[in-house]
Amino acid sequence: MFYIKSILSLTTLLILSGCGSEKTPDYVLFSGTIQNPRGEKAFVLGSDFSHELQVNEDGTFSDTLHVTQSYYSFSHAEMTTIFLTPGDSLHLDVDTAQYDESLVYSGTGAVVNNYLAKKYLEKEKITGDYKALYLLDEAAYVKKNQDIKEACTLLLENLKATDPEFVEIETKNLNYEYLGMLKYYESSHAYYAEDPEFKAQDFVTAPLKEVDFDNDADYITFSSYKNLVASEMMDYNTLMNHPETLAAVIARIKGLKSENIRNGLAKALGGYLSPSYEGVQEIYSGVMEISTNDEDKAELTEKYNRISKLFKGQPAPKFDYINYAGGKTSMDDLAGKYVYFDIWATWCGPCIREIPYLKEVEGKYHDANVQFVSVSIDRLDDFEKWKTFIAEKDLGGIQLYADGDWKSSIITDYAIDGIPRFILVDPSGNIVSADAPRPSSPALVELLDGLVF
């Protein structure tokens, strides 16, 4: 009897031991229902992570994501932040007709993701118009961003009992978001106030002096920290207006301990590679020396080879696109005038913000030897939306449609990796600038005045 009891006890122990040693799954079950879906694809994107989701005809999707605990982005029509933890079984409901307002999560992991959805709406409500925000004086701007941080912290307080681990992570994230806004103020205020010499008072950026800009773990976890590091290490306006600072930027990146940060900044620096930038060769050489990522280096080399064909005076690559007014228009049809191209799309917020400025510039040069041509890279599914947008906004100039989305010839031939993008071609069809100033920049009027008057 003792023998039988011992066997039973041992068996019970093994069963209990086996139950207790079950591992947490290293994946997330992610599903959703999209009302008014826009195409058959959706994406989950993260630091060194990209996964394509198949969206069915009824707008549903379901997949298994092998991820680490972190913030990610869900992209379909628009983009939203999500937080995934291995073991989650998360379901998303969204309507693309009212994207941010319709986001609702259910299942395991829903609490933190519903917080993130509410957080975005709260930030949007307090922030208001971005131009008005960045035009505030220093004290008012800092106060506004403190209000945003406090409002989000109040929302987060409700999660302490249910998910203290996420609360700890998100508290750090909120601080990085706040610091990022402080960092962006000087350059953004200078841009919107059209005052390139503007310098913010020290109290705005003083908190940034306490930041460790070589924190490998936070660089991997927080996109807010990643953006903060990038803006600190290589300010766009400084590099664009003062290419002589490039050597110091490259040296500073080389001195970082974190390989992830060095590689990330090297890739970001490669994004500055522009045919109109004086330091093209120095950027290319610097990135090739800094980066240990062979894939990034191969992509940069391919881009550099394309850009080398776009320097000033080179023949402008040609195209032949659908004209909103009827028929097609080619580069040859535009010969004899300076041509200012605006590469845009109806879904691109920064593109749309340039439209009022573009109309002003068009009016100024109405009788001059300049032709304004807007080329849309909207998806084929949005062709009718493109035509409606032109009519409703009363867009001027020549309106063309490139039906290849990001694979359009104008995108690949002109090495475009972000829009809006502006290109200026001379009457002989040669490049003046393959990365010309925006309509909102006084530099454009200065450039055109020097050419046509």
Image (cartoon, helix red, strand yellow):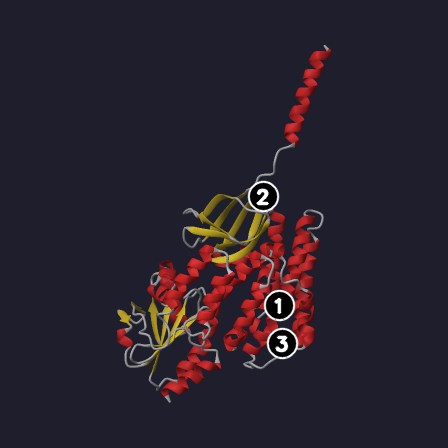
Q: Secondary structure at mark 2?
A: loop
- Foreground pick, 237 / 157: 237
Give left or right: position of 112 versus 293: right
Q: Which label's residue is closer to the chain start, 1 or 3?
A: 3
- Residue 227 image-quadrant placement: bottom right
- Checking the image for residue 310, the label placed there is none
Q: Reply above or below: 14 against 380.
A: above
| Image x and y of residue 95, in percent | 49, 54
In the image, residue 15 sits, relative to residue 249, either above or below, namely above
Q: Quadrant of residue 229?
A: bottom right
Can residue 235 be spotted in the picture? no
Q: Secondary structure at mark 1?
A: helix
| Residue 74 locus on image (x, y percent) | 51, 53
The residue where tag 3 is placed is: 136
Give the residue type at disc 3.
Leu
Furthest residue toward bottom: 453
Q: Could you give the CA–CA distance between mark 1 and mark 3, rounded to whole angstroms?
A: 13 Å
Name of the residue lying farthest toward the top: 1
Residue 86 disc label: 2
Crowding at label 3, few (<14), some or many (≥20) Cα neighbours within 10 Å? Answer: some
Q: Mark 1 — residue? A: 181
Q: Earlier in the sequence, mark 3 or mark 2?
A: 2
Q: Crowding near pointer 1: few (<14 within 10 Å), some, many (20+)?
A: many
Q: Residue 31 at what x, y percent from top left?
A: 51, 45
Asked whether the residues under the numbered discs 2 and 1 touch, taking CB atoms below 8 Å apart as contact, a structural biologist would say no
From the viewer's perspective, is residue 131 above or below residue 368? Answer: above
